[in-house]
Amino acid sequence: MEEKRPRWGGRTSNPAGAVSRSLVGSTPTLFRQPLAKTGRSIEADPMTADDHHDHGSELSPIAARVRALETILTEKGYVEPAVLDEIVESFESRIGPRYGARLVARAWTDPAFKKRLLDDATAAANSLGFDSPVGSDLIAVENSPQTHNMVVCTLCSCYPWEVLGLPPVWYKSAPYRSRAVIEPRAVLAEFGVALPPDTQIRVWDSTAETRFIVLPMRPAGTADWSEERLAELVTRDSMIGTGLPRTP
Ligand SMILES: [Co+2]
């Protein structure tokens, strides 16, 4: 039996992106196609059948299960897709990155914590008692005038979601995953980040076991700022390395 190509059509060029859409909910047609009606089991779903993640990404099978659950719950009237979208959106861009921002702001104000963060970011993060303990090996990489760090997952979409929330759609896109490695400076320019020519760019490739968070440079003019106030300057992108912190 020939499988119909999914309507969002993004699989060929961007398998991870297609998965992410089902999580973010930006393509409602995904949820309007119940698995039961197409006669496909979760295992036979084309999204999982040939989305191989060589280093064991957690996204694909979970995304399929989430989609199946959401379809059933929506059909039975237990959940409202719009409300789910709102919750996901809040994890993606509001709640999520705040934990990472607290790590960064603490590191900016507390040299002992900064040392712990750079030595063992998993332990440092977990010492602050966030909602979801960091399970993977989290590594903090520090920006300096000499070195700018940038994070990618070239194979899929591994991301330190415990401290940054859900990854943005572009993080999982094929162009970002390939170009971040090939031409990081050009990618940064498209994000509006212009670095001095002599600043070296280091690109870190995430895996299911090892995730990265960038410790950006503390903005000038914030000498007497509190940790809480500093955290407001820390953007999600500045912790992926595709952005810089806000300036006061
Ligand atoms: Co990955």
Image (cartoon, rainbow, N blue to C red):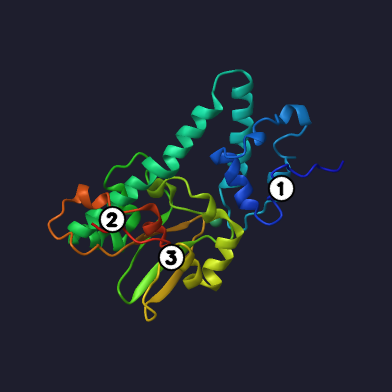
Cα distance between the residues tagged 2 and 1: 38 Å
- Asked if residue 178 is positioned above or below residue 172 in the image, the reply reads below
Q: Residue furthest toward the left?
A: 224
**What label sits on residue 104 in the rendered view?**
2
Please give the residue where the numbered disc 3 appears in the rendered image: 150
Residue at left offset 55%, top offset 54%: 172
Quadrant where ligand 1 appears? bottom right
Amino acid bearing label 3: Met
Residue at left offset 30%, top offset 57%: 246
- Closer to us: mark 2 or mark 1? 1
Rendering coords of residue 231 (x, y %): 26, 50
Q: Residue furthest toward the bottom?
A: 198
Q: Residues within 10 Å of mark 2 (few under 14, many from 20)?
A: many
Q: Left of 165 or right of it: where is 153?
A: right
Amino acid bearing label 2: Val
Viewer-proximal residue among 132 and 13: 13
Q: Secondary structure at mark 3?
A: strand
Quarter holding the C terminus is: bottom left
Q: Residues within 10 Å of mark 1 (few under 14, many from 20)?
A: few
Please give the residue where the numbered disc 1 appears in the rendered image: 9
Asked whether residue 78 is in view, the answer is yes
Residue at left offset 33%, top offset 46%: 98
Rendering coords of residue 53 (x, y %): 62, 55
Cα distance between the residues tagged 3 and 1: 29 Å
Q: Decide which of tag 3 and tag 2 comes sooner along the chain.
A: 2
Amino acid bearing label 1: Gly
Rendering coords of residue 192 (x, y %): 43, 64
